[in-house]
Amino acid sequence: MLADFLFRVRSLFRKKAVEAELDDELRFHMGEQLAKYVNSGLPREEALRRVRMEFGGLEQVKEECREARGVSLVEAAWQDIRYALRQLRKAPAFTAVALITLTLGIAATATMFSVVYGVLLRPLPYRDASALLVLNETTPKVGLVSVSYPNFLDWRAQSRAFSQMAAVCGVGFNLAADPPENVGGAAVSSDLLSMLGVRPVLGRDFEASEDQAGAAPVLLLSYRFWQSHFGGQQNVVGRSLSLDDRSFTIVGVLPPDFRLIETADVVEPIGVWATTEPGAKYRGQRGDTIVIARMAQGVALPQARAEMEGIAARLAKAYPAENDRFGVALRPIRDVLAGDLRPAILALFAAVVFVLLIACANVANLFLLRGAGRGREVALRIAVGAGGGRIIRQFLTESFVLAALGGLLGSACAFWGIRGVARLLPHSLSGETFSLNGAVLLFVVALVAMCALLFGLAPSLRAARVDVQSGLKESGRNTSGGLGQGRLRETLAIAEISLALILLIGTGLMIKTLSRLLSVDPGFRPERLVTMKMGLRTAKYAADPAILNFWDSVLDTVRALPGAKAAALGTVVPFTNDHSRTDITLENMELPAPGAFPHPDVHIVSPAYLSTLGLRLERGRAFTDADNRDGPRVAMINAMVAQRFFAGEDPIGKRFIFGHPSQEKPPQWVTIVGVVGDTRLYGLADPARFEVYVPFRQSVSDEMSLIVRSERDPNALISALRAAVASVDKQEPVFDAAAMEELIGRSVETRRTTLILLGLFGGLALALAAVGVYGVISYSVAQRSHEIGIRIALGAQRGGVLGMILGRGAKIAGAGALIGVAASLGVTRFMASLLFSVGANDPFIFAAAAAVMALVAMLACYIPARRALRVDPIVALRHE
């Protein structure tokens, strides 16, 4: 009957039959087949389902007849899309699962790509940014350090590998307002903007004459500052702005996308105040200066590096006391702007790509399973004249339609995902903007095409090679794909397990890293501690007595506040990124080479600094009010200095001088009166450093941080502290106020964010891999229901049947785990910079992750295995 039907359909097709004739043939034979199934005892719903599955392929014959009569490619494509939509609508469960899987994978990938694009790929607002380098000086003891301005002048004069060089130094200003403000700024060489290819949106650039000592002060405003403080008024150019009691003339406004290494609201010429005298004593004053340089045309980075190393060697020979052992580091400007976030961002993007690959493997498995169920349909279509290319085209069209729907839904989810991820990103990226922009949407389009090919190509090729003779058998038992498709589905499941295991191992390494970090003793008690900065930059604080009087008044006022348990002042407070370092010469020490002197961080602190911060006094005494300019100069050192330079000796009473021995004047000896415990100054992952403490009455500083230990929530005390400072001087701004625990949190936020996102991606990958294993084993059970029925009918124990099915799942899980562990041994090495006190190939993490993956995989196998035990032998044999 079926052969006769196919012969007649093929004849109608070749005669370019009209659709009505095909409809009549189709309805007649579908009715016959339905009656046959019902008469055999099948429920009507099951009979209808089987008939629709068997004859579904013939619905496409009408479309193929139209093509045979001659239709355009566009019409043919539209026919394929309509048919694909009908096929997806007929299988709602398959469509829902595949769409959810794709949506999650595409949304996660698009979200992370927006971060990758925003930080690493977005075009920089400079002309030919690839030729721009950031130059720092380096020392063996510290690594990267700032550049001394006299050295910069020599670099610029002697270099031929660079067409231009400009110095950039971070500076701060006090803006008299209500309330007063701290304004972050930068002092730059007058040719910086022209070198970068940046033009002000209003006004003009700096002139060379304005970059000289004694020139009238001028400013460029950032676009944000212009909008917030001048309302975007066009007549701002030529107006004056009072900063630090000095009047600056505004000459221009920078573009909205302009950015330097550090955020700057105002920019001034550096030469107005920078020391240009060539004397050696000025070369040791490095401040916070970096150099931005543009490589000359035709010059490569190695050539530029070799030239700068030669210049550094000549300067070290000319000025050994200040430049001995100093080198030069050259880094692309994009790398500097990305900072230490590049490894974390790339690791997260790699993780989300793994998730997408797992999603594609899952959908490919679903397509293989669905294609196996459509074997009779494909066989019928081939039997009536459809070629293999036609079958491939139709299946790929379904893949692209599904991927496109997943792309649309994924883009919508990514819109919200980007907002969520932006809140998790480190504090250093708070000024960045991440959005679903054109570049991200183009990436999603490419992603859709790639996904469609990844999960659609193999199933379509398999479908085109269906055996027509076996496919047309009424039982349809062999239309399900056979051994080859089973192996392909298992291979995909193994790949899913391997990729998921890599993510689990990465998550485990980050969990252990964060645990180790948070267990590090910072060297002080951070709880209920708040800190804020102040800078006395106006003329009334030009003399030391006025500065000390202000600090004393602030301390007295703050200590009288309700809830303030203790208060102190310090210049280099832990976790605030403040630093001040200098060489010291110990008494009776064998003098080292000029660049090998001890180079500690120097803290200028008030007497109550140790008790307020909770530092340990290990030996000797702390400072008192008697440690002033009238008394002998004293200092405290940290335990690291004591162990390194006074091993086996009592350092109390020993002396040192700041700087190097000089024949010009008698040395000012400083006596060590105490030893303080080591602190983690720049982060929990940062090792302890040499530290020296000096009393603030003997070394007066006009920029200090106020530290207050509160009896309650420290954040609730900030407004009262601001008011207390205002009561001393209402024109003095307080800035960068934060609880110490918040600052410590910021020091680990890159790793914390990496852990959170990697954990989310790892959990999603684990779930998708479990679904993939479940699908393979479940389908295997369905295919072997006849075999299982026979086994049980012949007396096989149910435990044996269960073991047989679980054994197959164990082989898949074991193969995936072995491949995943082997791959992780290489992949996790790229995470080394994110880890702390944890090896990239930590055996415990590898074993734990593999155990979790195996457990989840076996649970995914157990559900279909239990269902297999409920197979009724009689029903299984009768249906077969």
Image (tube, rainbow, N blue to C red):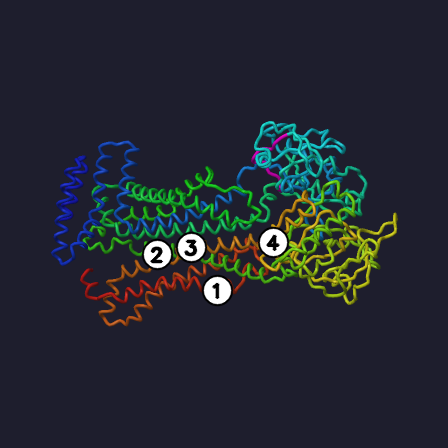
Which circle's residue, 2 or 3, is located before the other in the chain? Answer: 2
Disc 4 and disc 3: Cα gap in Å?
Answer: 42 Å
* Amino acid type at mark 2: Arg
Instruction: Give left or right: position of 733 versus 470.
Output: right
* Amino acid type at mark 4: Leu
Disc 2 and disc 4: Cα gap in Å?
Answer: 66 Å
The residue that label 1 is drawn on is 848
Q: Residue at x 46, y 38 (%)?
A: 437
Q: Please, is residue 677 above or below residue 699 in the view?
A: below
The residue that label 4 is drawn on is 717
Q: Residue at x 36, y 58 (%)?
A: 773
Instruction: Give left or right: position of 744 versus 599.
Output: left
Instruction: Depth check: give the residue in front, 624 or 265.
Output: 624
Instruction: Depth check: give the residue in front, 776 or 85.
Output: 85
Please state which of the two labelled residues, at mark 2 or mark 4, is closer to the viewer: 4
**Residue 497 picture location, percent across and down:** 42, 58
Instruction: State the quadrant of the C terminus.
Output: bottom left
* Amino acid type at mark 1: Ala
The residue that label 3 is drawn on is 764
Which circle's residue, 2 or 4, is located before the other in the chain? Answer: 2
The residue that label 2 is drawn on is 487
Please state which of the two labelled residues, at mark 1 or mark 2, is closer to the viewer: 1
* Amino acid type at mark 3: Leu
Instruction: Give left or right: position of 119 versus 4.
Output: right
**Magenta range:** 252-262
